[in-house]
Image (cartoon, grey):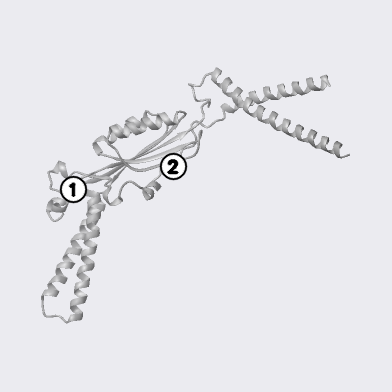
């Protein structure tokens, strides 16, 4: 019996050593940080904190040109001098200190007076993920991006700049065409005495054109509004430390991390075996009493 117990103890010890070795090796296979998602714009459809019609991402050169506010400039020749651009940054950052780095990101956004458009968290520790989408004044865009690049372990970084001048000019041409159409219909209505049916048709046509002009006005407001923003989206991804490229993780920490991982699994296996053995013994005792 004693020999049998010694063999069980030796087997248990060797199993623990094997798990410890596996735990240390496992640290070299951990992803650091996990594969980041592709730059997302999907959050734009989930914004909760701002009406998209009031969130202007573009920046124009109207102030540099000394032009008036956008509703007054649309009918003047200076409108051809307006240039519009849009700038967006996408960052993915890995971290082992999720809460601390989340607080740093929020502090950086607050420092540059960023405006939250979306805020989404998912996952559970130690695999949490947080994606935040903010708008920031164009003058503060570079400073915010630079601050965010220094938080955690930067995994991906991209900046996109888009010239939206052609988009603006197409809208302006469409507006001019609608206004001319509206003028011609108004003249028809004010001409000869039309029949009641023709008057109603002309009135409905005028209402339709005015509705289209209002829709264009909203789009112009998004491009030329007084409150301009550039877009910044940052994703914070939590990961487990210990990858071979993680130079801050020492050999002693790797051994200790492997020990704790092995101990957890070894105790779990021991508990499972103990429960199984106790179950077998209990069943055998009950059968003996029955007999």
Residue at x-position 50% and y-position 37% = 124
Q: Is residue 221 above or below residue 238?
A: below
In the picture, the disc for residue 190 is none
Q: Residue furthest top?
A: 252
Please identify the quarter of the rendering in which residue 1 is found.
Answer: top right
Q: Which residue is mark 1?
A: 82
Q: Quadrant of residue 86?
A: top left
Q: Is residue 135 left or right of residue 94?
A: left
x%, y% of residue 197? 20, 80
Give the alpha-carbon distance from disc 1 to disc 2, as whole Å: 33 Å
Residue shown at the point (13%, 50%) measured from the top left: 78
Observer-nearest of 186 and 19: 19
Task: Say which residue appears at 26% left-offset and 53% top-offset.
Answer: 167
Q: Earlier in the sequence, mark 1 or mark 2?
A: 2
Q: Nearer the viewer, residue 257 or 150?
A: 257
Relative placement, left or right, of 137 versus 22 is left
- Please provide percent x and percent y for residue 220: 22, 53
Q: Secondary structure at mark 2?
A: loop
Identify residue for label 2.
38
* Crowding at mark 2 (Cα within 10 Å: few <14, some 14-19, many 20+): few
Instruction: Decide: few, some or many residues near mark 1? Use Cα within 10 Å; few <14, some 14-19, many ≥20.
Output: some
Can residue 194 be seen by looking at this rendering?
yes
């Amino acid at each position: 019996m004693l020999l049998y117990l010694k063999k069980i103890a030796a087997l248990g010890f060797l199993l623990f050593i094997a798990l410890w070795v596996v735990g240390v090796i496992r640290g070299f296979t951990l992803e650091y940080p996990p594969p980041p998602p592709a730059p997302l714009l999907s959050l734009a459809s989930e914004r909760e904190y701002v009406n998209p019609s009031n969130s202007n991402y573009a920046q124009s050169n109207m102030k540099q040109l000394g032009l008036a506010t956008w509703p007054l400039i649309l009918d003047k020749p200076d409108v051809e001098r307006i240039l519009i651009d849009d700038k967006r940054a996408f960052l993915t950052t890995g971290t082992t200190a999720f809460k601390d780095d989340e607080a740093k990101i929020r502090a950086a956004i607050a420092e540059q007076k960023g405006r939250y458009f979306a805020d989404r968290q998912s996952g559970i520790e130690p695999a949490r993920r947080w994606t935040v989408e903010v708008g920031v004044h164009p003058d503060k865009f570079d400073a915010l991006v630079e601050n965010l690049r220094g938080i955690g372990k930067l995994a991906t970084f991209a900046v996109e700049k888009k010239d939206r001048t052609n988009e603006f000019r197409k809208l302006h041409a469409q507006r001019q065409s609608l206004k001319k159409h509206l003028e011609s219909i108004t003249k028809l209505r004010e001409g000869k005495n039309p029949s009641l049916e023709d008057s109603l048709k002309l009135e409905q046509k005028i209402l339709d054109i005015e509705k289209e002009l209002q829709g264009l006005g909203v789009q112009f407001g998004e491009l030329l509004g007084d409150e301009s923003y550039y877009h910044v989206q940052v994703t914070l991804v939590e990961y487990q430390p210990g990858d071979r490229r993680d130079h801050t993780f020492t050999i002693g920490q790797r051994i200790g991390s492997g020990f704790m991982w092995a101990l957890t699994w070894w105790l779990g296996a021991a508990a499972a075996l103990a429960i199984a053995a106790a179950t077998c013994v209990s069943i055998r005792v009950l059968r003996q009493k029955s007999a």
